[in-house]
Image (tube, rainbow, N blue to C red):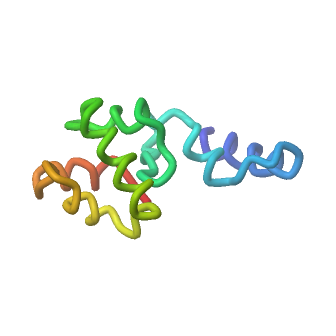
């Protein structure tokens, strides 16, 4: 059902200007959707297990200073983000 809704949103994209990616990301993550590290708000980032407000802010700061993430592995370049947090982010995020 969520996929059908997504397809309907794609059709509406032509009328609203909203991209397919934005439509998909705006859906409830309960269906397995992932948070995009390059576009998510602080509140959306905080939905990832292990990320608090400070961590989410550091992700936003990094992407603004570096032009976004090329891969999820780049989060280890952020101070305080190690392998354990990387694994949690990989499970719930995308770029």
Residue most extreme to the front: 65
Give coordinates of residue 25: x percent, y percent. Answer: 55, 44
- The residue lying at 58 percent from left, 38 percent from top is 26
**Which one is nearer the viewer's eye here, 33 or 73?**
73
Percent across and percent down for residue 66 are 40, 63
Q: Quadrant of residue 32?
A: top left
Q: Quadrant of the C terminus?
A: bottom left
Callout count: 0
Using residue 24 as the reference point, say whether residue 47 is left or right of it: left
Q: In the displayed image of the protein, which residue is found farthest to the bottom?
A: 70
**Residue 4 at what x, y percent from top left?**
69, 44
Q: Is residue 72 left or right of residue 44?
A: left
Q: Considering the image in quadrants, where does the N terminus appear?
A: top right
What residue do we see at 28% from left, 65% from top? 74
Residue drawn at 37 percent across, 48 percent down:
61
Residue sitting at x 33%, y 39%: 57
Residue 42 sits in quarter: top left
């Amino acid at each position: 059902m969520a996929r059908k809704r997504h397809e309907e949103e794609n059709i509406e994209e032509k009328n609203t200007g909203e991209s397919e990616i934005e439509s998909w990301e705006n859906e409830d993550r309960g269906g397995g959707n992932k948070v995009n590290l390059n576009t998510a708000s602080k509140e959306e980032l905080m939905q990832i297990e292990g990320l608090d407000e400070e961590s989410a802010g550091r992700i936003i700061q990094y992407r603004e200073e570096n032009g976004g993430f090329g891969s999820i592995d780049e989060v280890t370049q952020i101070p305080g983000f190690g392998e354990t947090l990387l694994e949690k982010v990989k499970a719930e995020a995308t770029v």
